[in-house]
Amino acid sequence: MGRIFVFTGKGGVGKSSVAAAHAVKSAQMGKRTLLVSTDMAHNLGDIFEKQLGREIENVLPNLDLYEIDPSYVCENDYREMMHYVDQLMGSGQQLSDMGMIPGTEELFCLLRIADLYQTGGYERIIVDCAPTGETLSLLKFPELLSWYMEKLFPIGKVGVRVLSPISKTVFKTEMPNRQAMNDIEKMYQKLIELQELLKDRDICSIRIVTTPEKMVVEETKRNYMYLNLYDFNVDGLYINRILPKDIANTFFDQWIEIQHNYLHILKDTFSVLPIYEIPWYDEELKGLSNIKRIVEDVLTGEDVFETKVLSQRDTFLQTEEGYELLVAIPGADKADLDLYRAATDIVIKAGNFKRNIPLPNVLRSYEVAGAKYEDDVLRIRFEKGE
């Protein structure tokens, strides 16, 4: 069974270099490895000093690179669905202009990664993600869209069959044809598989790259909280660009002291995670020889790619009064947490993010009796309704 390693973090912290170093290390270990970029500002080609196109390209023994073009993916894999949506939008507009519908770039990048995993051609897929905000959108998108598709898709299929003969006359629009609906159904099935893939602790690991600076540290803590809220397995923290303490220049004394303070905060906050410290190098990490410096200085152990299950999964427990749902949300501010029942789901809000958790059938007749947040875990109590 292959493994997927997703690298995320605030923009400019060096995610691409860290992901590239892992890819080189994996290839050196004799593992068939693919390094993928989902960031629209691709820079894998710059790092490896190679011109990359729309397809996978080999750069080293056991190592391939792939800068995903989501427009190219949707045009080739979902042609009929794209053709229908382009007709619907009219006025010469096209969905292939990916910026028109938020989230479409992330969606097609994820679907392509899932396809590559399912083909079994690689033992390790290493994903260089876009900055934090886009990564969170990317990772939560399958769950969000699957929720809507599950509720609307059966209705949509019936609607197509009933309304298609009259839609053009009455509504002045075309209903999707059978091929377009097949594309939609294919995408929906892939979303279900994708969601299971990304949340399988034995397959997917999320790893956070950060630097010892105030704004970056604060975003890293929020990032970790949101990733746990969406039930992903975070199993590594990489602290990049650490200044050496023996610099013979007083100009850096204050910077070294500031970094020391934030290093202490990061190590305390993320003590449950394996932490890797990467020095600030004296030149730009560009070219294979420079990427290998991270491999030789930091990624020295064979356990770098070991499966580590460190975060708690959503858990339903039976109690004397009814049931409890436990959701790990480390580092959350209790004042920012909220929850409510929406039909057969529990909706948890943390700041600007929310997650729908479907309830098992046994809890459909139960009501939320209370909730408590302690020790980084939200405990929701359910008791039998009237």
Image (cartoon, grey):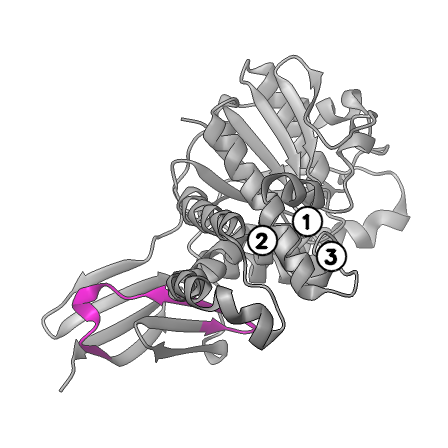
Which mark's residue is nearer the viewer, 3 or 2? 3
Q: What residue type is labelled 1?
A: Ala
Closer-to-camera residue (247/324)? 324
Please report the residue visible at 70 percent of the width from the left and 56 percent of the height from the top. Answer: 95
The residue where tag 3 is placed is 94
Q: In which quarter of the image is residue 356?
A: bottom left
Where does the magenta region start and end?
349-367
Spatial distance from mark 3 to mark 2, Cα to Cα?
Answer: 22 Å
Please report the residue visible at 54 percent of the width from the left and 58 percent of the height from the top. Answer: 176
Q: Is residue 355 magenta?
A: yes
Please report the residue visible at 69 percent of the width from the left and 19 percent of the height from the top. Answer: 58
Residue 176 higher or lower than 209, as above or below = below
Please report the residue visible at 59 percent of the width from the left and 45 percent of the height from the top. Answer: 78
Q: Which amino acid does label 3 sit on?
A: Gln
Residue 379 horizontal/vertical position (percent)? 30, 69
Residue 385 higher or lower than 73, as above or below = below
Quadrant assignment for the N terminus? top left
Using the image, tell me which numbered label, if any, was put on residue 9.
none
The residue where tag 1 is placed is 130
